[in-house]
Image: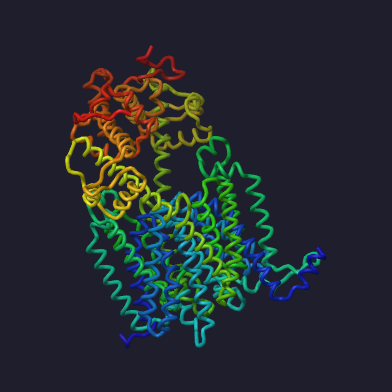
Amino acid sequence: MTGLSITAKVLIGTSLLGCVAGMAGSFVVLRRRALVGDMLAHAALPGLCIAYLVIGDRHRLGLLLGAFLAGLLAMGVLTLVTRTTRTKEDAAIGIVLSTFYAAGIVLLSVIAHVPQGNKAGLSTYLFGQASSMLDADIAILSVVSLVALVVLMALYKELKVFSFDPEFARSQGWPTLMLDMTMMGTLTVVTIVGLPIVGVVLMAALIIIPGAAARFWTERLGVMLVLSAVIGAATGSLGTLESSGQLAQWLGFDPLGLVTGGIAMPTGPVIVLCGAAIFLFSVLFAPRRGVISRAVSEVNLRRKTARENLLRTLYELSEHNLEQRPPIALEAIRARRAWSPWAARWLLAAASRRGDVERKQNQVRLTPKGLRRAAEVTRAHRLWEMFLIEGANIASDHVDRDADSIEHLLTPDTLDALEKRLADSGALPEEDRQVPVSPHALEESESTPSRDP
Amino acid sequence: MTTIAEWLAQLDDQTRTTLWIFTVGSLTNVSCGLIGCFLVLRRMSLLGDALAHAVLPGLAVAFLLSGSLGIGYMFVGALAAGLLTTLLTQALHKHGGVPADASMGVVFTSLFALGVILIRRFASQVHIDTECVLEGLLDYVGLNTIPVAGLELPRQFLSIAPVFLLNVAFILLFWKELKISSFDPALSTTMSIPAGLMHYVLMALVALTAVASFEAVGSILVIAMLIAPGATAHLLCDRLGRMLWVAAGVGVISAIAGRLLAVQFDTNTAGMMAVVAGACFALAVVLSPRYGLASKMIRNARTSLRIFSEDLLGMLYRLEELAVQRSLGRGEAVQAVGGGLLAHWELSRLIRRGYVVSTADGVRLTEQGRRHARGLVRSHRLWEAYLVEHLGLPHDHVHAPAERMEHYIDERLAREISERLSDTEVDPHGRDIPAD
């Protein structure tokens, strides 16, 4: 390992850290306790200081042990306070975080006054210094990653159940306190080994970002864990390459625009910004859960709804004389729907492009194809109305709105099942099979046949 | 004014510095503590954490755009960054479906990283020291003064005092609205108090307070002071008005005690203030009269003692009822109710109080003890009868619940139960229910 260049070492270290922090962090993100990671990172400071005062700065393992003990103490205090008092978890996290960290600051300032005291060694823990990574650090990181991986894999099933349904886990007689402590203990270890690399403030980012980003791409925990490990590793390695200028050299340009001034950038913040970029990409472009894809599907649904509402309105207006498909005035449509003239015209233009209607000045007429589609839409609406009246016992003048909101989502299978059910119960007369008669009076259309008096 | 100026001028440097540290520290802590009460009540404490970190890029950008470290520019920049954090967090949570805490964590760490990089990239020659952002410069409060109306006022005082007044004024003016929207946002909306608007105004105030406190005390003390006094007060009071006073008190105590301790140990003042605030919270956790660990333990111990003594009395009464010839020894009696030190203690207490006499051949009830025990056994059997008659429980399932319930049935409840029973003479197991 000594043959490796500094950059290669840092690269290995940061990718490993990103990978394992992402996996351990996924669980806390799912359990809505993401900021516990932040608390652990801050709470480690007094432990580091005390270990430094006791053993000096030559033994990194000793310093990390001090930090680990402080982290465990912080977890213990947090658990005690949230379980036994009325203080809520967020306030407790904030208090433990700031008090421990302030104690660390106080100790740092004490260390600065100690003869031969040198807090430079400790301030790398505040802001992280990946380039100071030693072979020993990589060895520690590898062992921690391996152990964390083994723990998470061995307890995968239990942690999964516990994360999503702690009550169920308890009712199964599992030792949930032990599970909780294992999970948080793993997180503590990972947080502590990350401190010298990215620093106290930014360690939380490595814990939260990969899991939160991975959550956008999948609904399955297993996939999410693998993805967050990959995202974490990518974050770590991309950040390292970017901060050393390597990435800009390979690509021929600088993707984050950070290194152009020729000033070396601190690795930790660059890693976090790379993570933020990956996160932002996931927020925007993930299929299904991403903001863009959700916006697109919402727009599509609205357009489908408007199209179907137009067809049904036209059907209802033509219902007194379906054979002839009479021309209908624009005003008559607008009288039924709260559409602006602009929206109505736009919808009609779209309908005529699809061949559903023929337009002649201010009048429209369903085409045979449009009539067929309109009949389907109206059938869905009325079947659901009848189902509400028959099955849910809702008054016939209250079903129109309810049906409005559901008719666009009914599948053909559901409609056939509805029709069969209504026919079996005798609510749907034989002659109505194509499109049932509306179960309630339709406004402003005296000519429309209706079963209600 | 001149008298104050003269008075200040005749003080030596050390005293003046100490006074200024007390003043600036207290003002900062009280400003944060008052606003923090509402954060704690609304379960948004960690927003303070997020804001305190996220203002860094605001400071950097303000410097880059204005080219100066003037307080006005810094203020605007940090305030903008604070509001940006709130908006981004909300947007991620609402439109991106990210859990609230994770979105906060992502936003503030990313902004902080951006701030560090901006400073390194464009402003490495100026002194926005990231460490001073964390630790504050309270120790140097007297060094940078601005003359105002003949007084040499420290810069930090000038930035926190108006914010303090603003916070107090806001709380006084919108007291009712703040109260309702903090405890019941739905109710406040139906009363046409815009809960959403209150939320954003409060956020803006938090950002403003954080920024104003920043230069003096650093982000760590801001976080501590936004949360710890409010949470401490919440453990001690049940009324909002009192809670605000207590929070302010904790703020002042932390400022003064923190400074004194910091001088004592020759260390960072802001850090020590935060530690004192944390210690106040720890004290409240343990000693709060109603919600503290100690009082809870005492209450639990009292209840178990009472239950032991009532069990002892009840058992002795039942033995008399069965006309058992042999009386129980003290050890046997204690064993029969579960044993342990507390049971021994209670038996001795019953003997001391004259409910039980301990003779050579064992313990037995006195007349006074018998009267008391009769009431307990009556409660027990009335409850058994009630469970069978009104809840239809089988006979063999009523003893255990009655055993728990008997300790909590007072006279009034016993009377009400007996009024609802068809038979108040005999319990479901066929034993007599003792009369009142």
Q: Position of residue B292 (x, y in %)?
A: 44, 54
Does the image show residue A292? no
> Nearest the camera: B270 or B82?
B270
The structure's colour scheme is rainbow
> Nearest the camera: B357 or B208?
B357
Q: Residue furthest top?
A: A453
Q: A275 left or right of B400?
A: right
Q: Position of residue B145 (x, y in %)?
A: 72, 71
Q: Position of residue B219 (x, y in %)?
A: 55, 66
Does the image show residue A349? yes
- Could you tell me how many numbered marks the image carries? 0
The N terminus of chain B is located in which quarter? bottom right
The C terminus of chain B is located in which quarter? top left
Q: Is residue B135 above or below residue B340?
A: below
x 24%, y 60%: residue: A156
> Residue A311 is drawn in which quadrant?
top left
Q: Position of residue A86 (x, y in %)?
A: 44, 51
Q: B307 left or right of B65?
A: left
Q: Is residue A271 above or below residue B196?
A: below
Q: Residue furthest front?
A: B360
x 36%, y 29%: residue: A374
Q: B135 left or right of A58?
A: right
> Residue A323 is drawn in which quadrant?
top left
> Nearest the camera: B403 or A402?
B403
x 40%, y 83%: residue: A55
Q: A253 left or right of A16?
A: right
